[in-house]
Amino acid sequence: MSGTTVALMWEARAADGRGPELLEWARARSAELAREPLRRELLRAPQDRVLVITWWEGAYGDELPELPEPDAELITRPVHRWRFESLGAVESLG
């Protein structure tokens, strides 16, 4: 491996009233990835938005397992996806 870490971010906005369902859908799909990430985190925000971040060992351009697109009835718009290469953690001064 290259010794670098890549973070994949997946964000979707649920259809009206379907936030809890989208969160559970994302939780289940993130547990079914083709392989286990170094780390995985689920977050939620107002307007029934769900964010999943997975961290992987590898290079920025490597092929990595990604969450699929949910059924169109569950979301209000296409999923947003971002990919970042880690530059290392920053320690708190306090």
Image (cartoon, rainbow, N blue to C red):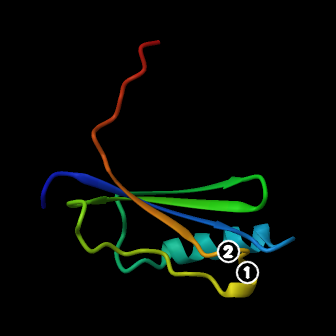
Residue occupying the point 36% across, 69% down: 36
The disc labelled 2 sits on which kind of residue? Arg
Residue occupying the point 85% across, 71% down: 16
Q: Which residue is mark 1?
A: 74
Query: Could you tell whether 67 is left or right of 55 in the image?
Result: right
Q: Residues within 10 Å of mark 2 (few under 14, many from 20)?
A: few
Residue occupying the point 58% across, 72% down: 79
Which image quarter is the N terminus in?
A: bottom left
Quadrant assignment, res 62: bottom left
The disc labelled 1 sits on which kind of residue? Leu
Q: Which residue is mark 2?
A: 77
Residue occupying the point 29% across, 37% down: 88
Between circles 1 and 2, the one closer to the viewer is 2
Q: Nearer the viewer, residue 41 or 59?
A: 59
User: In the rendered view, would you say 44 is above or below 13?
Assistant: above
Q: Position of residue 57 (x, y in %)?
A: 25, 59
Q: Position of residue 39 (x, y in %)?
A: 41, 56
Quadrant assignment, res 59: bottom left
Q: Secondary structure at mark 1?
A: helix
Cα distance between the residues tagged 1 and 2: 9 Å
Q: Position of residue 2 (x, y in %)?
A: 13, 57
Q: Secondary structure at mark 2?
A: loop
